[in-house]
Every structure is written in C-alpha cells, then in structure tokens.
Image (cartoon, helix red, strand yellow):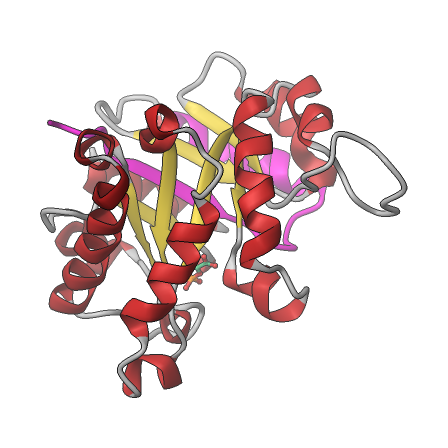
Amino acid sequence: MSRTPFIAGNWKMHKTVDEAEQFIAGLLPRVSTADGVDVALCVPYTALAAMVDSTRGSRVEVYAQNMHFAEQGAYTGEVSAAMLAELDVHGVVLGHSERRELFAETDKALALKVPAALEAGLKVILCVGETEEERERGDMQRKLRHQIQEGLEKVPTERLGDVVIAYEPIWAIGTGLVATPEQAQEAVSFCRDLVADRSKEQAERTRILYGGSMKPDNAGELIALPDVDGGLIGGASLDPQPFSAIVAAAA
Ligand code: PEP
C-alpha cells in the first residue's frame, strides 16, 4: 500500500502571531506546487486561530502541541480536544519527549488523550523514542513497545491507521545528531510491527515519521527508507526556506 509522505513542523514555544504570519507568507508560495505530500505545522496555542485563517485553502494543516483528555473540568491552564476542533484546528501532536520529560506526560495520560483527540475529529501524531542511555543498555524496543502499546491501547482497531507515529530518538532531538539510516529503519519498522500485532492491515496504513535533527541535507535519504513516511521537524521548521526544502525532498 502506498502511504502519502507527511512533513510536520513543530515550532515548540517559538513565534508570536506576528512572527507566525511572516513565516506563513514566506512558506505558502514555496510549498504550493509540492505534490503528493501532506504538510502540517504544530504551533503554540496563541497562534492557532491566526494560522488556521492564514492557511485556509492551502495544503498546510495546523496542529496544536498538546491537549487534555477530559471534555471539560477543573484543569486550570489546560485545553480540550473540542476547544481545538472548534477553531478548525486539524490535529494535535501528543507525547512529544519534551512534554514527557519536562511536564511529566505519562503513557497512561496518552492512552486517554489519543482516543479523545480522534473522537473530537482531530488527527493525531503520537511521539515515541528512547534516550541515549536506554539505547545503550539495549532497552530501545522495550521503551517503544510501552509507548506504542499504551498510547494506542484505547484506539479502536479500525482507527489505528489514522494515528501517525513519530519515532524520535531523544538523543537526536535538537542536538544535530541524526540516526543513521540503518538505525532509523530498524526502529521505525519495529514501530510498524507493534501496530501489526493489533492489525496487519492497519499497520500498512500507519504513517511513521522520523524526527531528530532532520534537515534539508539529510531528509531525502531518511524519507526514502522503506518504512519512513516523512519527518517531524523542530529547528528546521522555524524558517520557511529549510522547511520547504524538506517538503520538496518528500514530494
Ligand atoms: C522535535 O522537536 O520533534 C525535533 C525533531 O526537533 P529537531 O528537528 O530540532 O531535532
């Protein structure tokens, strides 16, 4: 089965609305002719409404970077899936390693967030990945198994293929270190096998991205790997030029 390549930028806590508007004005003309690739930007909450407006009718979709699993309630500072959907936000990236490490995001919470997002009509990118220490002591597969099995646990089998998985080795995020093609292919195909344990058919549909210091000069090789269906891009998504070059490499 052929899967449409997917390039998603993760701005993290970067860009005011004004800066986001300048970025979009630079990006849209650069990606308008890139065929056969889906493009998304995961932007701060404060820029969501403006970015949904500015990208309407374009190929660029707008994602949030987190949400709460509850429909509503006494959760000061949190945002629900319905609140994102009301803004016409297309999706949400969940379980980024920075949320797991710095904000104590757990697999248990993700097991509730992923189905809550899907039920609200949002697309989901679920991030997984091991630390350098876990890789060195041979625990990569155990970590990925936990993260994927729990994150997808409450997703109905027929919807498994709707969840995009981003394999992001933590040692490669923002460090300039990139997984070798062999390391990326091995981990990503292991992620696909984990989905296949629930459904082979859905595993064929599942798009799995690589993330970790992806740049224009290494994107082509990584995206060409048999099981890698695109990239989740941090640093190189902050400027339209490198980001559009990665989109072009995937197109
Ligand atoms: C990320 O934050 O998901 C990421 C992959 O960052 P970078 O591309 O900067 O390594």
Q: Nearer the viewer, residue 55 or 228?
A: 228
Q: Give the quadrant of residue 214.
A: bottom left
- Placement of the C terminus among the 4 image quadrants: top left
User: Magenta span has 7?
Assistant: yes
Residue 109 percent location from the top left of the image: 62, 51
Kindly tell me whether residue 17 is visible in this rendering: no
Image position, residue 135 (x, y; %): 30, 80
Is 55 left, or right, of 161 in this rendering? Answer: right
Quadrant where the image shows the N terminus: top left
The answer to whether residue 107 is above or below residue 4 is below
The residue that appears at 70% across and 18% down in the rendered structure is 86
Which residue is the extreme one toward the top?
A: 57
Where is residue 234 drawn, in percent x and y? Answer: 46, 56
Direction from residue 217 to residue 9 in the image, left or right: right
Q: Is residue 196 magenta?
A: no
Numbered circles on residues, count: 0
Q: In this picture, which residue range is highlighted in magenta?
A: 1-29
Vertical relation: 185 (above or below) 17:
below
* Foreground of the two, 6 or 240: 6
Tell which quarter ligand 1 is in: bottom left
The reply to whether residue 186 is in sight is: yes
Q: Residue at x 88, y 47 (%)?
A: 76
In the visual, does 163 lie left or right of 199?
A: right
